[in-house]
Image (cartoon, rainbow, N blue to C red):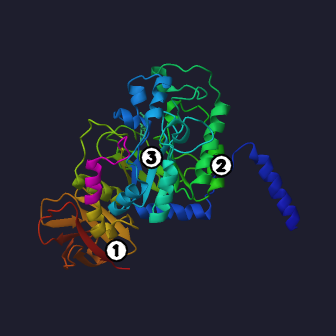
Amino acid sequence: MRKTFITLMAALALGTGSVCAQAYQPSPENIQARKEFQDMKFGIFIHWGIYSMLADGEWVQHSKRIDRNEYSKLAAGFYPSRFNAHEWVKAFKDAGAGYVTITSRHHDGFSMFDTKATDYDIIDATPFKRDILKELADECEKQGIKLHIYYSHMDWFRPDYPLGGTSQALPQPEGSANWNSYFNFMNTQLTEILTNYGKIGAIWFDGMWDHPNNFDWQLDEQYALIHKLQPACLIGNNHHTAPHEGEDFQLFEQDLPGENSAGFSGGQKVSDMLPLESCQTMNNTWGYSITDKSYKSTDELIRRLVKSAGMNSNLLLNIGPRPDGQLPDEAMTRLKEIGKWTKRYGGTIYGTRGGLIKPQPWGVSTQKDNTLYLHILDLKEQSLTIPLSAKKIKSARMYDDGSKLKLQKHGKDSTVINLPSVPQSVDTIVEITLKK
Ligand code: JFZ
């Protein structure tokens, strides 16, 4: 009986296999990793490559219409004499970040790690000859933060990459496109990344928007390879649309989930199943820019972290290191200041999820079990009305000094909280204990 059943199921599976691909089932390790990812809430994004030398952002090859062979000569001059992985990781950790996401290979196609798949990489093409990815991976392991890897799907160097929209403006390559060769190249590199650098928290893809929607990137196959090599490794892809099959978290660029001020997230529906991550720049550029001094204030960055937590998302805050390997002074100052805040208030962020009070004009809420944190970011008066029945609240206090707060019932579904003063600080936090 049992045998017949199994045979029948096998026949069914075979029969339908060719019609519809099997739905992605995340492994138990992957589901656990998603939870840990959400608990971390805060990561640092690093855009670093040979473009940093031109000090005009990571798109400089494109924006200046540089010939690929000319551009590639930059590599022989890349010698980041002040690069120190220990110092980087310490600075990220002290800021309160739980992970770092670094560009292993950006659109310019240059690999910042030791790879056998090409000579256009930091070991073979630069006098520096140090595998910065390995040094970073070892430091992350030592200091206990996670390593995530940015990997570009598009490439402005290899002739086998099928020319996409962005390549039109660039001097054309010699040689002809060959998708199979390019696809194998990427998969060889991904295999190296997932084999030689310890546990990788996530692969962060970018660039598939270079081709129209009907281009077949063979994502299923590539994603399956990643999940086979490291089942707990999360996959995210900056394609600005709803998550594809096989992806483990959803990305938002320069906006919080649901917002679209930067114009990248139009029509991107926010997933209520997957972890969310919003990547944002500290100034205006991702890669190092020597002229971009438009750094957001520390207060503004803290508010963005708080807001993203209240919107159930992680914040991935970007820094573009200098060509000498050091983080810009402005970034270092901000990391230190953010660290002072997270040390004191991180308990209201880490391990929380977006709270039961949805984002309000005055701020957001985060929640861990029956503790609800109100983060007041913008309130000009001493009393705060929240859309939560007083019946559901056991007690409320100021997070800062623990002083008890008086509550007033306000209609059936809302409560007025009398604060000790008009909120002045970057984030005034009220801790509410909910009745179970
Ligand atoms: C992408 C990269 O191009 C950029 O260099 C950086 O790495 C960022 C995090 O991700 O940014 C994009 C992606 C898509 C568009 C523009 C910028 N787009 O579709 O216009």
Marks 2 and 1: which is nearer the front? 2
The residue that disc 3 covers is 269
Element carrying mark 3? loop
Q: Name the residue under label 1.
A: 371
Residue 325 on the magenta segment? yes
Left or right of residue 198, residue 405 in this image: left
> Can residue 313 be spotted in the picture?
no
Residue in the image at 48% along x and 40% along y = 239
The residue at 53%/32% (across/down) is 155
Q: Position of residue 122 (x, y in %)?
A: 51, 41
Q: What element carries label 1?
A: strand
Labels 2, 3: front one: 2
Q: Closer to the N terminus: mark 1 or mark 3? A: 3
In the image, 237: left or right of 285? right
Task: Mark 1: give few (<14), some (14-19) or many (20+) Cα within 10 Å.
Answer: some
Type of the residue with mark 1: Thr
> Is residue 250 or residue 129 the one in the foreground?
129
> Which element is circle 2 on?
helix
Point out the stretch of residues depicted in magenta: 322-337
State the image coordinates of residue 25 (x, y, percent, origin top left).
63, 57
Residue 225: mark? 2
Q: Out of 72 and 152, give the one closest to the viewer.
A: 72
